[in-house]
């Protein structure tokens, strides 16, 4: 049995389990019936897309046909080689949004609908068969009443964003060949456009109604300014073309500062100076928050020191060990952050993401004097899956740890059930790190012919359960104990997925585990 078959079984079983959970817990919920129906139909489509290629590969092996010949040639080698398309990944964020939506029915369903429309666009773009197009058209038609019930600004924004997403699905792979699989590209676009939708809608409504000041919690304001500034700056970088990379970078982000950050700070606080004061007061508002920021600053300095010392190491074994060191360091960021101040961690994670995007832009444009230095330093982070121009491993690592927190905060969910927020910490910080360390040290038996070892997978499961046991005693007061058998099953399934998937697991595993942990009853 090959790893692809294991992955297929786990994914299809995961879909079935979530459907069963929805049926048992939300059978009387009729307000979001169309979202539930659409998600289940898309799960069936994704299951077919996951199963059929596996059957095709087995048939090709029996007939002696090369597996490469069974793949479609229409993709022009723009997606990452040695990986399956991973279309199933595109459903992870919509499923998490749906579960949270059904727990809190009063939350705006617009972003959830957009998330599913992105999945539909992904299917149509990557599998333009007649059956797929007809089915996806039917699913979109199902949402017509929800679309018509929204205000005009929401309708216009939703249509415009969908058009942009469909365009980018074809443009990005050709601009950065072999940097993504289809599923990973879909997740990246969801991370950008799902938060962008309510931001643009609120801005349009504020302009339409003449609202002077938009009041938001400070953590959300910081995250919004970081998200908007980097997004607008990246947009300018993509449309401004000059010979000098340094000039292109300076002009793009200078325009982003003047055209986006300054007006946004005025809209949020009245003046940029007041924005600076409010943010400073928020960051220094308590001793615990100051201590947490100082601790994070120390870890950043340690990370920079390790990167500078090892900037010229490019061997695969050394690179793997170094990347796992960063897994441990980021654990030191997220565990205290989640336990002490989740709202501050939410804001800081968006700022950190913006810094990483800016750093990658500097590296790609070779902006002096940091461009060449970053190019050498990023060799520390390179994995075997970084085969394109983009170095996405650091971004995926940060997003993997942050996505559970982002989704929870984005939907205005309360933090009474904290366990799902530790999905990234468990699956990537603890499980993936221990699997790599133990597997490379003593691993001898491969997981059904794959690259991962049985010893590493067992170490991943045991380490996560030990961490959960300690976390349950210290933070949750024994609330996990009655559900320990189910939690063990969730940890085991996620570890098996890590051993079998060809996707970059830094952002796939946390979303997978987050969906499963959402099915646990909070106490």
Image (tube, rainbow, N blue to C red):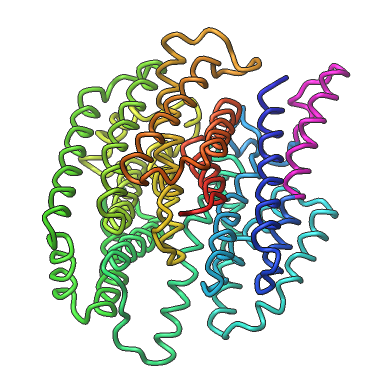
Could you tell me residue 171's position as x and y percent? 57, 52
Magenta span includes 69: yes
Which span of residues is magenta-colored? 44-71
Looking at this rendering, what residue extends furthest in the right direction?
63
Magenta span includes 239: no
Name the residue located 28 percent from the left edge and 21 percent from the top edge: 312
| Quadrant of the rendered image containing residue 408 | bottom left
Could you tell me residue 511's position as x and y percent? 52, 45
162 and 72: which one is in front?
A: 162
Q: Is residue 121 above or below residue 141?
A: above
294 and 515: which one is in front?
A: 515
Q: Does residue 260 show up?
A: yes
Q: In which quarter of the image is the N terminus?
A: top right
| Quadrant of the rendered image containing residue 258 | bottom left
Q: In this view, does 324 lie above or below 196?
A: above
Name the residue located 60 percent from the left edge and 82 percent from the top edge: 150
414 and 71: which one is in front?
A: 414
| Quadrant of the rendered image containing residue 35 | bottom right
**Magenta span dominant secondary structure:** helix
Locate residue 64 relative to residue 192 in the image: left or right.
Answer: right
Locate residue 279 relative to residue 236 in the image: left or right.
Answer: left
Locate residue 428 relative to residue 81 in the image: left or right.
Answer: left
């Amino acid at each position: 049995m090959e790893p692809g078959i294991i992955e297929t079984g786990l994914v299809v079983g995961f879909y079935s389990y979530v459907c069963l959970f929805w049926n048992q817990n939300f059978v009387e919920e009729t307000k979001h019936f169309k979202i539930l129906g659409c998600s289940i139909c898309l799960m069936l489509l994704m299951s077919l897309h996951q199963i059929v290629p596996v059957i095709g590969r087995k048939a090709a092996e029996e007939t002696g046909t090369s597996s490469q010949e069974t793949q479609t040639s229409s993709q022009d080698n723009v997606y990452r080689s040695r990986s399956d398309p991973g279309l199933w990944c595109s459903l992870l964020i919509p499923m998490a949004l749906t579960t949270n939506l059904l727990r809190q029915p009063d939350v705006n369903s617009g972003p959830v609908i957009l998330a599913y429309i992105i999945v539909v666009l992904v299917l149509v773009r990557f599998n333009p068969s007649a059956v797929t197009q007809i089915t996806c058209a039917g699913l979109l038609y199902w949402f017509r009443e929800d679309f018509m019930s929204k205000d005009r600004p929401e309708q216009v924004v939703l249509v415009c964003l969908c058009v942009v997403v469909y365009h980018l699905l074809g443009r990005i792979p050709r601009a950065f060949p072999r940097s993504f699989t289809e599923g990973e590209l879909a997740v990246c676009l969801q991370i950008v456009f799902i938060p962008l939708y309510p931001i643009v809608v609120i801005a349009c409504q504020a302009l339409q109604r003449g609202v002077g000041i938009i009041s938001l919690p400070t953590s959300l304001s910081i995250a919004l300014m970081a998200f908007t500034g980097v997004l607008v700056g990246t947009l300018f970088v993509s449309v401004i073309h000059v010979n000098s990379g340094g000039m292109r970078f300076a002009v793009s982000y200078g325009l982003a500062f003047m055209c986006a950050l300054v007006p946004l700070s005025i809209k949020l606080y009245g003046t940029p100076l007041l924005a600076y004061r409010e943010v400073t007061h928020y960051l220094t508002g308590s001793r615990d928050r100051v201590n947490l920021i100082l601790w994070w600053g120390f870890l950043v300095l340690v990370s920079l020191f390790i990167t500078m010392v090892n900037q010229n190491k490019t061997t695969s074994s050394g690179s793997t060990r170094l990347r796992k060191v960063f897994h441990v360091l980021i654990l030191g960021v997220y565990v205290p952050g989640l336990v002490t101040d989740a709202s501050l961690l939410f804001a800081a994670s968006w700022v950190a993401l913006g810094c990483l995007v800016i750093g990658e832009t500097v590296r790609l444009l070779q902006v002096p004097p940091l461009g060449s230095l970053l190019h050498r330093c990023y060799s520390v982070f390179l994995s075997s899956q970084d085969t394109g121009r983009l170095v996405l491993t650091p971004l995926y690592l940060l997003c993997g740890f942050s996505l559970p927190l982002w989704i929870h905060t984005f939907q205005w969910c309360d933090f009474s059930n904290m366990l799902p927020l530790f999905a990234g910490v468990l699956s990537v910080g603890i499980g993936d790190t221990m699997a790599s360390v133990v597997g490379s040290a003593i691993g001898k038996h491969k997981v059904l012919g794959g690259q991962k070892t049985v010893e590493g997978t067992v170490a991943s499961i045991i380490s996560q359960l030990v961490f959960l046991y300690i976390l349950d005693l210290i933070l949750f007061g024994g609330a996990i104990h009655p559900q320990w058998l189910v939690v063990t099953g969730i940890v085991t399934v996620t570890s098996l997925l890590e051993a079998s998937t060809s996707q970059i697991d830094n952002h796939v595993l946390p979303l997978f585990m987050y969906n499963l942990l959402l099915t646990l009853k909070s106490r």
